[in-house]
Image: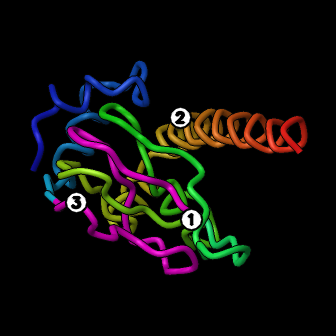
Amino acid sequence: MVPPEILQRFSFFPGLSADELNGLSFIGREISFQRGDRIFQEGDSAHSLYLLLEGWVDVLIDAEAGDDPHGLMMTLTAGDIFGWSAVVAPYIYTASAVCASPVKAISLSQVELQALFEIDREFYCTIVTEICHVIASRLRATRLQLASLFVAG
């Protein structure tokens, strides 16, 4: 269990009710990783949504080009979420997450999240809307990276 006050620090959870925050806090587990640990691999079943408390997490995609088979897409910092695939069908991670430093995070189980969503569909809509904001933001960042490659090339 994670105190609701910790969850309130995340801009990802705007305007959630006390009951919704309590539900999330009940299923939240604080976890730690060491630098270099792979939290999940692209293509794996998405078992958890993560909230980054401390440290840096590199988001990598399978590039299969050049000497490095994994392309760095971005580095996440405290306050970011990752593993959003645990909320969106088909529940398969679309990238890998590797610790660039020691990391503390909150893990929200996909199975337990789905159980909460079944109870409260409005809560589900709120979370999915926020997930869409995250995806859109990361897509913009990726487009900027691609555009810079064309300008440099």
Q: Is residue 65 above or below residue 145?
A: below
Question: Residue placed at 31% from the left, 36% from the top?
Answer: 20
Q: Which quadrant of the structure image shows residue 132?
A: top right
Question: Which of the pair 97/14 is nearer the observer?
Answer: 97
Badge 2 crowding class, 10 Å Cα cut-off, few under 14, some 14 to 19, many 20 or more, is some
Q: Is residue 85 above or below residue 73?
A: below
Q: Is residue 17 left or right of residue 33?
A: right
- Quadrant of the frame with the C terminus: top right
Q: Is residue 34 magenta?
A: yes
Q: How many marks?
A: 3
Q: Which residue is mark 3?
A: 35
* Residue 55 position within the rendered picture, expressed as x and y whole percent measured from the top left: 24, 42
Q: Is residue 127 left or right of residue 152?
A: left
Q: Which residue is mark 2?
A: 126
The magenta span reads 33-60
Element class at badge 1: loop
Q: Which residue is mark 1?
A: 95
Q: From mark 1 to mark 3, how far is it between C-alphas? A: 18 Å
What is the number of the mark on residue 49?
Answer: none
